[in-house]
Image: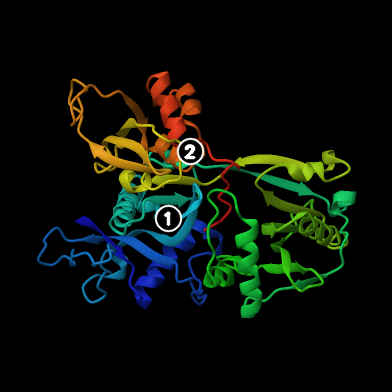
Amino acid sequence: MSLAYRVVPDDDDHRTAYRRLLQYAFAPERGPDWDDEPREQPDEFEPRGLYDRPTDEATATATTESTDGRPPAADPATVDATALVVCGGLVDFRMRVRGAWRPVGGVTAVASPPERRRRGHVGTLLDGMHDELRRRGVAFAALWPFSHPFYRRFGYGRTNDYVVHEFPPDALDAPAATPSEAGTVRRLSADDADDVDALSVLHEKSATEPLALRRSADWWRLRIFRTWTGERFVYGWEDDAGVLRSYLAYRFEEPDETDGHRLAVDYWGATDEEGVRQLLAFLRNHDSQVATVRLLAGDATLLDRVTDPDEIETRVKPGPMVRVVDVETALSGLATPAVDERVVLDVRDTRHDWNDGAFEVGTVEGRTTCRRVDIDASGTGDEGGVVETVTIDAEALSQVAVGARSATALATLGRVEGTDDGVTRLDALLPRATPEPYLREWF
């Protein structure tokens, strides 16, 4: 048998097999017998899988790709749903990279049953996803890893860390949590188009950091107001003019043996300081209902807002990862402060030969250019003359490309190799982004 990378078809048997793989991987405590109705998925979400297929091509499923770069769907008439051996999903996002919106493939819901693990199937699935994205003209992939070392093996680099704050609600009794305006705090509805539109406008204004992702109305409705398995409360603060200036999306978690209920804030945003104060006041008002609040953030500035920061338990956790799936496309057209710089990158990509080799990165009118070049064993380039190169692997290049790390910092760690001048020129072309990148979206 061989494996075929396919779209999981919209067929009852195949979608049930897909959901069972996900359930075993992410919610095994629910047991093998369940009859939940499948939840509606956003339009951006596309299921993928590897299917067993006979090595005899006469009985194998079709291998012709669609014209848009997507693989064919497994044919329910010829492929049994039990042939699905590993699954995942691609999410069609737009991500802010160096000031411009670039397409990115969100890799999610990767699941393999225990009897098929440690056979390289997940790597084969990722290879299929990366090849598909490249054919679709998508240069970046991103994911939230269950294990950072695992995904580093496939060329992914960590983009950012995030801060987890846990505290009793009354820890917010401080001037910084005291609003100065009135306005209205109200619950927002996923079924109200005006509410969703207002949230979209607020998100565009508040999530201005590098690696922020655009959210469609569908994504708000099915991924912010909902989790994969449940619902979230979404509240917003409007000023007296009726303008939505901040919001919270949160869940209540059951207590364990020693703690009371927890209010877990998964998403929040504010256009200004007053909006932040309104959110903190809203959380503080849950002091009679929950024992703790958990708030995710991109930094630890909450500690500056409270009277006693020792009341807030703060920890930093490693965050999501990104990968360049097509070097030429990824490094072309990025905004750069460099005026007349040039560097040749010797990219080492053990998974994808289309990325493995030498690429010249330059600049034209404030934008980067990138093209593959040939360098022979003596170091002579395709235009003659000795070319000095900077050696970089796929993981490090991914971090540099999106501004998550500087080439100089990675060279200090031994992950970029080259002369000081070459590394400095790479930093001039692709400097570390400011403010710090923060990919906040769970997908």
Label 1 neighbour load within 10 Å: few <14, some 14-19, many 20+: many
At x 73%, y 46%, the residue is 165
The mark lying in front, picked from 2 and 1, is 2
Please tell me whether residue 107 is drawn above or below residue 355 in the rendered image.
below
Q: Position of residue 301 (x, y in %)?
A: 74, 43
Question: On residue 104, which mark appears?
Answer: 1
Please tell me whether residue 77 is drawn above or below residue 411 in the rendered image.
below
Q: Report helix, strand or loop for mark 2.
A: loop
> Which residue is outermost to the bottom?
192
Q: Which residue type does callout 2 highlight?
A: Pro
Q: Report helix, strand or loop for mark 1.
A: strand
Please tell me whether residue 222 is drawn above or below residue 425 in the rendered image.
below
Residue 174 appears in the rendering = no
Position of residue 221 in the picture relative to residue 293 (left or right): left
In which quadrant of the rendered view does residue 201 lie? bottom right
Q: Earlier in the sequence, mark 2 or mark 1?
A: 1
At x 60%, y 53%, the residue is 208
Residue that carries the numbered disc 2 in the rendered image: 337
Please tell me whether residue 67 is drawn above or below residue 35 in the rendered image.
above
Quick one: 290 or 246, which is closer to the camera? 246
